[in-house]
Amino acid sequence: MSRRRVLRTLGVGAATAVGALGAGESALSAEQEALCAESTWDFSGLRALFVNGTLKRSPEVSNTQGLADLSIEIMRRNGVEVDVIRAVDYVIAPGIAPDMADHGADRDDWPMLAERVAAADIVVLLTPIWLGEKSSVCTRVVERLFGSSFTPNDRGQLAYYGKVGGCVVTGNEDGAKHCAMNLLFSLQSIGFVVPPQADAAWVGDSGPGPSYLEAGSGGPENDFTNRQVTFMTWNLLHTARILREVGGFPAHGNQRAAWDDGCRFDLPSTEPPA
């Protein structure tokens, strides 16, 4: 099957796959299988982390996870090791220090979760929409990512330089693009590389109604959503592969410590003449 035909038929074939994945199974439609089989790129060795900002604790069904599961399965079929965190299942203390237990918190699980972020080449943030915004849980994850970003990598860059970021949004109210805009800006601002079309979303009818995985929602059949989650996934993979092959993001003009020491890279130095 040609790549063009795969993309044209993906919206129809993806419905069963997304529903099945949301139920805890791992399955792709024949069209999605073909798209993965046609890939000529090597993504093995890459690691991805999906951080779900749902307000529902495990094992309650997360509709946002249902959409993300399609992206996860595509990655796994291409040899990527995928890790998933449901943030609400952990105690993530408020604050922007790497470990809030050092600042009065009784408990803080973030340092353990930060190690899983550090191990990932790709980080995808997931959130439902509440009152037009990302969830409070997702907001806290972003705050803690921000707090951990200032520990420099071995090149003197922000910690997340060389990592790739994206987002998945679902809800029954307006705000998907607003949430994606907020999340993608946040990720790039703290050092992540954001590829083209790095967001995927589904929004149901305004007001009470079926959520993404529920019968009658139309979510798994939505061609736009299926196209976006597919493009997002492949663009995340391509960008992570490119960064791996070139050895990360170049370290010139972006090292905070060097700047603080007086280096102005291509600008005149602030150091006094010898």
Image: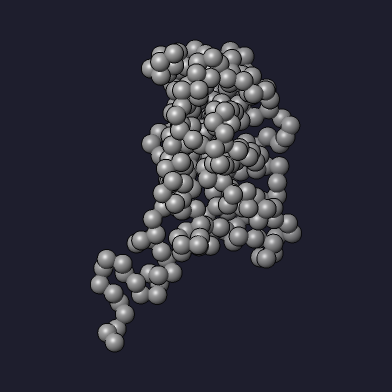
How far across and how far down the image is residue 152, in percent?
50, 62
Residue 216 seen in render: yes
Question: In which quadrant will I find the C terminus?
Answer: bottom left
Query: Of residues 83 and 96, which is closer to you in this image?
Result: 83
Residue 183 seen in render: no
What's the coloring here? one colour
User: Residue 81: which quarter of the image?
Assistant: top right
How far across and how far down the image is residue 44, in percent?
54, 37
Image side of residue 258 versus residue 70, left or right = left
Question: In which quadrant will I find the N terminus?
Answer: top left
Q: Residue at x 52, y 45 (%)?
A: 121
Is 120 drawn above or below residue 99 in the view shown? above
Residue found at the very far left of the displayed protein:
268
Image side of residue 246 versus residue 78, left or right = left
Q: Residue at x 70, y 49 (%)?
A: 91
Q: Residue at x 36, y 61 (%)?
A: 252
How far across and how far down the image is residue 241, in percent?
46, 41
Is 172 drawn above or below residue 187 in the view shown? above
Query: Of residues 59 and 210, which is closer to you in this image?
Result: 59
Q: How many marks?
A: 0
Image side of residue 39 versus residue 27, left or right = left
How far across and how far down the image is residue 114, in percent?
61, 52
Q: Residue at x 69, y 62 (%)?
A: 101
Query: Of residues 178 and 14, which is closer to you in this image?
Result: 14
